[in-house]
Amino acid sequence: MSNTLIRALTLAALLSAGSAQAFVIDGNLSDWGVQRNGNATDWTPNSSAAAYKVEDQHASYLNPGYGGQAYDAEAMYVAWDASNLYIAIATGHNPLTPNTPSNDTYGPGDIAIDFAANGSFDYGIELTGSGTTSAGHVYSGVNWAVGLWKSNGAWTGYYDPNLAGNKALADPAHPTSILSGSDVGTGVVAYTTIGQNNYGIWAGDLHYFYEVSVPLSAFGSDWANGNHFDLHWSQNCANDSILVDPPVTVSVPEPGILALLPLGMLGMMVLRRKKPAA
Ligand SMILES: [Ca+2]
Ligand SMILES: [Ca+2]
Ligand SMILES: [Ca+2]
Ligand SMILES: [Ca+2]
């Protein structure tokens, strides 16, 4: 093989290992295949998504709470490559919604990740930032805030989710915001704050989007040990939530990339051997 060909193969193999999924983290989900045609199929992603869930609602009652489109968690998408986990969310909830429970208005929550899908949310990704947590950072050992609803769907009877009485009653299956935790990694978050219509069948409804990339290294051995995981997002009231349960176990890198890697390494070895001895 010529040196040029070896170099080209090496580059191709290394590039494919490092950017199997190249999402632009800008709050525009067109790179996931989400479209803006006013059709139900707008929410269906392209093959870049490893898993997704769509639950586009419109009317006042969501489940278990109320609020209609303004509190609708509509869709969540997930993908990963050898380096990063990528997540996208579509919602009717404006990220700038004030968090003032006394006025019956609640701010956005964060992404919760449950490795082993055993009901304990082991990591959180902060989306908008708070006094003690930074947007795009990954936290472990998270103290989660919870919503206003019991596990049977009944209201806890409280308006403020952080009151001790509420926390004792609320369903832990719907974590909302990261109250505290250990900062274990830094990623990137983009989100939109201007509502966009003409997505899905409720063409007049406004939608907001989050897009996230975080390094897999933040999850330590929880990522690489073949663990099953769930992703969850809600608002601080948990009137509506969305959960994605990828139907695959985590394995990095993908088989196609594994086949290419030795070729890239072979290329590097050949190049190294051809260098004149010092
Ligand atoms: Ca994008
Ligand atoms: Ca909706
Ligand atoms: Ca929904
Ligand atoms: Ca867990």
Image: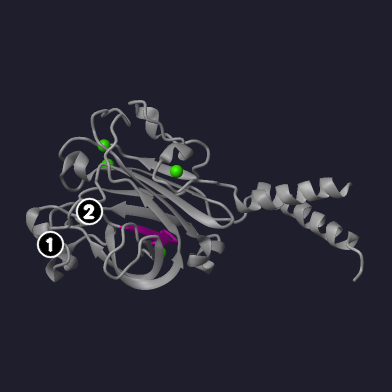
**Nearer to the camera, 275 or 46:** 275
The relative height of residue 73 versus residue 274 in the rendered view (above or below) is above
The image quarter containing residue 270 is bottom right
Looking at the rendered image, the quarter that the C terminus falls into is bottom right
Residue 62 visible within the image:
no
Asked whether 136 or 17 is in front, the reply is 136
User: x, y percentage for residue 205?
Assistant: 24, 33
Instruction: Tell me the element at label 1.
Output: loop
Task: Mark 2 and ligand 3: say if the CB distance to the nearest ligand atom is below 8 Å.
Answer: no
Percent of width and height locating residue 249: 53, 54
The residue located at (52%, 68%) in the rendering is 220
Q: Is residue 249 left or right of residue 273?
A: left
Q: Is residue 66 left or right of residue 89?
A: left
The image quadrant where one finds ligand 3 is: top left
Q: Residue at the location (50% across, 61% down)?
A: 215
Depth order, front residue of 207/142? 207
Q: Nearer the viewer, residue 60 or 134?
A: 134
Q: Which mark is residue 238?
A: 2
Which numbered circle lies on residue 160?
1
Within 10 Å of disc 1 (Cα), the crowding (few <14, some 14-19, many 20+) is many
Give the class, few, some or many, for how many residues have Cα within 10 Å of label 2's Cα (few <14, many ≥20). Answer: many
Let me know if residue 53 is in the magenta part.
no
- Which percent across, then down, holds residue 191? 35, 49
Q: Is residue 115 magenta?
A: yes
**Residue 193: numbered disc:** none
Disc 2 versus disc 1: distance between alpha carbons? 12 Å
Range shown magenta: 110-118
Which of the 4 image quadrants contains residue 156? bottom left
